[in-house]
Amino acid sequence: MTNKKNNGLEYVKDLPGYDRGYPIYFENELVDHLISIVLELGAELWVVKDRLAHLEEILSENNKLSLADLQTGKPSELLQEKLDEERQQLVKRIYGRLYSKYGGDVAESEGAL
């Protein structure tokens, strides 16, 4: 039976960096810094991909673009579903490798997202 308090995530206690006040995940601190860089670049990449997809949708529907449409509008439900799936695949493909020792490369997204 799954413990409701931690939603069956007891295994996270075995992951590096779990202990509070000890945010170092790898023996070499440089590796932690490199991973931070990869995480930041991944976040920035996703923002650009998301915004570009929305821009393309606006242009294909209206054949014109206003900055206000891009800043205040939202992607259609169909595009948002596609982006959600692409984001999950990106997270799994790139960040799953960080914890491949623990099965992160083959884990389902519910535990990671």
Image (spheres, rainbow, N blue to C red):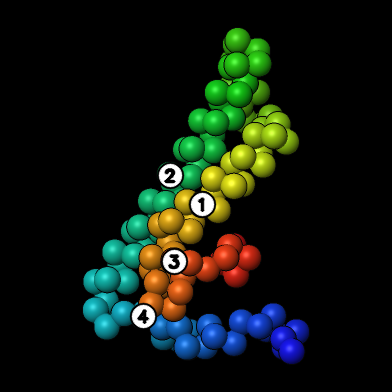
* Mark toward the start of the polypeptide (4 vs 1): 4
Disc 1 element: helix
The residue indicated by pointer 3 is: 105
Can you say which quadrant of the picture contains the N terminus?
Answer: bottom right
Kind of residue at badge 3 = Asp
Residue 24 is labelled as: 4
Q: Do we see residue 66 in this rendering? A: no
Nearer the observer: mark 4 or 3; the answer is: 3
Q: Dividing the picture into quarters, in which one does residue 50 lie?
A: top right
Kind of residue at badge 1 = Gln
The residue indicated by pointer 1 is: 89
Can you say which quadrant of the picture contains the C terminus?
Answer: bottom right
Question: Mark 4 and mark 2 in contact (Cβ < 8 Å)?
Answer: no
* Mark toward the start of the polypeptide (2 vs 3): 2
What separation in Å lies between label 4 and label 3 (alpha carbons)? 21 Å
Left or right placement of residue 106 versus residue 68 in this view: left
What separation in Å lies between label 4 and label 1 (alpha carbons)? 27 Å
Residue 97 is labelled as: none
The residue indicated by pointer 2 is: 45
Classify 10 Å Cα crowding around label 1: few (below 14), some (14-19), many (20 and above). Answer: some
Q: Dividing the picture into quarters, in which one does residue 62 lie?
A: top right
What separation in Å lies between label 2 and label 4 (alpha carbons)? 25 Å
Q: Position of residue 34 (x, y in %)?
A: 29, 64
Classify 10 Å Cα crowding around label 4: few (below 14), some (14-19), many (20 and above). Answer: some
- Compared to residue 99, the image places residue 42 above or below, namely above
Left or right placement of residue 65 versus residue 92 in this view: right
